[in-house]
Image (tube, rainbow, N blue to C red):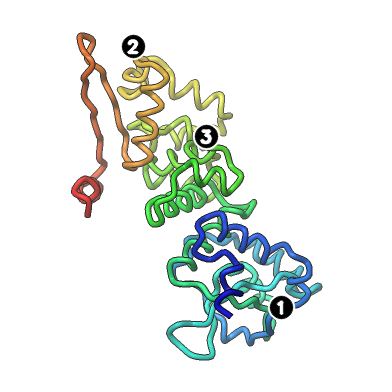
Amino acid sequence: MAEKQKTRGLGRGLSALMADVTQDQTTAEQARHPDMMVPIEKIRPNPDQPRRHFDEIALDELAASIREKGVIQPLIVRRDPKQEGYFEIVAGERRWRASQIAKLHELPVLIREYSDTEVLEVAIIENIQRADLNAIDEAAGYRQLMDRFGHTQEQLASALGKSRSHIANLMRLLSLPADVQELLTTGQLTAGHARTLVGNEHASSLAKQIMLKGMSVRDAESLVRKPGKTPATKAARKPGKDADTLQIESELSAALRMPVSIDHDTQGEGGRIALRYRDLEQLDDLLRLLSGN
């Protein structure tokens, strides 16, 4: 039995877990033959589910489809470690939510033996693979895979079939102020618009202008680059601030989740790094990060 579990690839890293999720989601044979049918009230969502935003209109559309055709793809679950006879969702919470709207009494499930760590990792992978995931949730998923499991951007790109630049560009969005991220999460701002604001200390006010005026991405770029518009823009246009330096600034901004400015000494190889925090809470987060706690 132990040998059989090993063939599923658990514990072999990100690629193996991703392959396991992909197989569970797309194999027609498994979709037709779930491990068992479980009463819907015996299924509980994962309390550590990384995805927090579920579009109500999309859920209603999925519920309508479920009423007509049923749940075609089984949910991936594990036995609830806290209560016997119950199951915890690993992947498929949208189907569970929509099935409640459709008033189903039981759902097909595939039972997997996952540790707490693997549950979170698989849930993140499953969310990242969804086509309708907003940019902030996707970026947060990459951040969790890196911070909690030690994966690099290169490893994520290889395992998930994404380019490293795609992952890096999305993760930079996490350095934006919370109100700008909220506009992006709710679809009032696109990822293209938001990328023009990364590292800009006036990102919040600029985002509101872009949204209210219905600007295109090109118009947003022109607004942000407008001479004398912001101190951050002036710094970015300093002579000698090459593309590599700007790239490092962006990556540090994404990693630290606050604007970062790098200025090289003109007479040597040294320089200085300037960080801007928005409040004392963010400063505390930075101190904890630098102290390794």
Residue 103 appears in the figure: no
* Disc assigned to residue 240: 2
Residue 175 pos. (x, y %): 37, 41
The relative height of residue 225 versus residue 62 in the rendered view (above or below) is: above
- The residue wearing badge 1 is 34
The relative height of residue 96 versus residue 184 in the rendered view (above or below) is: below
For the image, the number of numbered tags is 3
Residue 25 pos. (x, y %): 68, 64
| Amino acid type shown at disc 1 | Pro
- Label 1 crowding class (10 Å Cα cut-off): few <14, some 14-19, many 20+? some
Return the residue nearer the eye: 290 or 67: 290
- The residue wearing badge 3 is 165
Q: Quadrant of residue 5?
A: bottom right
Residue 66 placement, left or right of 51? right
Q: Secondary structure at mark 1?
A: loop
Residue 179 placement, left or right of 71? left
- Sequence-wise first label, 2 or 1: 1
